[in-house]
Image (spheres, helix red, strand yellow):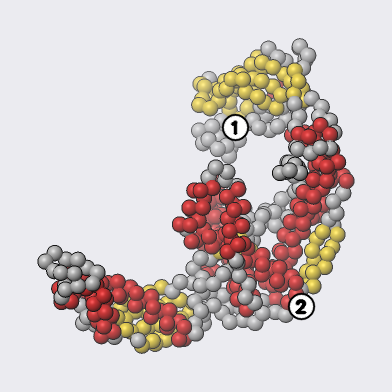
Amino acid sequence: MQVTVTNADGLKRELKIQVPAQDLEARLGVKLEEMKNQVRLKGFRPGKVPVSHLRKTFGKQVMGEIIQETVGESSQKALADEALRPAFQPSIDLEGEIQEVMDGKADLTFKMSFEVVPAFELADFSKVSVERLVAEVKDADIDEALKRLAENQKNFEPRAEGAAAENGDLLTVDFVGKIDGVAFDGGSAEDANLELGSARFIPGFEEQLVGAKAGEEKTVNVTFPAEYGAEHLAGKDAVFEVKVKEVKAPAEVTVDDELAKRFGFDTLDKLREALAEQIKSDYTRMSRSHMKRAMLDKLDELHDFELPPTMVEQEFEQIWQQFEHELSHQKKTAADLDEPEEDVKAEYRKIAARRVRLGLLLAEVGEKNSISVTEQELNQALAERARQFPGQERQLYQYYQQNPQAVQELRAPIFEDKVIDFIAELADVQDKTVSRDELFADPDAEEHEHVHDENCDHDHDHDHDEAKPAKKAAAKKPAAKKPAAKKKKDD
């Protein structure tokens, strides 16, 4: 095998690999000899089929397999001999007439094009300093969580005969919706429950039923939002004929031991303890999220090296496709944006470059420090994933067994977190006490995901920058989740 480097411009590499025809012929001979004891042909005793007959019958098929195997093996050997690390799967281009190679009249010659992983120096992590936001769980936080739990458990009781409906009441109604006097599909219902103030119906619908009484018939005039999901209704004026059948007021739910027992706890104190632990866990998760983002920002700031152009372009295309998909759901295109499309693309290219840079950086740290994802960690992540799809566990496990890329997407965030934890152990991480609102304020208004480039030959894991850089959102407060039921001692 002869290897020639035909291009070494920056991170781009192109190798020309030539495998002599006689080498292919030798491999063909070995394969055909092996087939003698395996092939059963009519008219020949087992093991007595002449190689010449096997060549005539199976020669082209076997040679095709040999060429495919040779391309793969010689490509890997060339990379190893040249000490090259491709940033993604190299592209292969065969040269010459393949039929002549199949017939043994020409050498196998092909070009392998790719970009290499850049060489760069890692910063001294002991000199990296980041803040970790922390917040204390206060009694007020637990009280608020208890209040939300109680509200979710509220019941409704019929109001007195002739009483007017108030905001927060639950109405049982029949209604028929019409546009230009014609009823439309999906615009009618009987015995529908509607909680006034819940904003479950079209804007303006619920407000017009405040003050209604059981037995009354009301006419509700509304306009469907311009971005309404059903195109044939979007922006249309509609009239709903509504019959109010029952009006119920919310019954007061007392925060006491009885409420705690609904969630499997003996006393209210036990429920408060469970909520405190749950809130603490939420705080810890957000604290880590802030620390991780600060760490990634610092690592991005401390490292500057040439990036494989194709990797950046692939990352950008993925981001842009996601952005266009989100726009399509809003029935918009890039032309509807407040800023020029090219400016938005330029901003997203910066995000793509950041992802690639951090992916290469984390992969390098992982490789140099033997950080990897164990099978136990992967199985645990798979089990947690399966719990999100009750009743479909078997199908989900089969899906991951049949899709290596899906498994890699499961492995990527685990690897990323392990590398970040490793760096945090070396770095100077200072705790900063903040309020709950500050802790849950997202500086980018978007959740961060893990994106993995499956074409790399090593683990590249990227933080997910904001999908919409210009958009900011209000701080979110932690929701009161239903606490896990207390286990009995004999469980």
In the rendered image, the residue lying farthest to the left is 43
Q: Earlier in the sequence, mark 1 or mark 2?
A: 2
Viewport quadrant of the N terminus:
bottom left
Q: Outermost residue, front direction?
A: 490
Q: Which SS class for mark 1?
A: loop
Dot 2 amino acid type: Ser
331 vs 274, left or right, is: left
Residue 10 position in % (x across, y down): 51, 82
Report the front residue among 219 and 71: 71
Question: Are the residues flagged by discs 1 and 2 in contact, CB closer than 8 Å?
Answer: no
Residue at point 57% right, 22% down?
189
Dot 2 surroundings within 10 Å: few (below 14), some, or many (20 or more)? Answer: few
User: Residue 45 location in percent, x, y?
Assistant: 15, 69
Type of amino acid under label 1: Phe
Labelled disc at residue 48: none
Counting from the top left corner in percent of width and height, residue 112 is at 40, 78
Label 2: which secondary element = helix
Residue 476 sits above or below residue 179 on the image: below
Q: Is residue 442 visible?
A: yes
Question: On residue 126, which mark appears?
Answer: 2
Residue drawn 51% across the image and 79% down it: 85
Q: For residue 100, say whether it is visible.
A: no
Q: Quadrant of the C terminus?
A: top right
Closer to the camera: disc 1 or disc 2?
Answer: 2
Give neighbour class at mark 1: few <14, some 14-19, many 20+ (Cα, 10 Å). some
Rendered residue at 36%/83% (across/down):
17
Find residue 360 and report its horizontal and vertical position in percent. 59, 73
Task: Report the disc number at residue 224.
Answer: 1
- Rendered view: 67 above or below 404: below
Q: Tell me which residue sits at (84%, 30%) in the image.
A: 254
Distance of mark 1 from mark 2, alpha carbons?
58 Å
The total of numbered circles placed on residues is 2
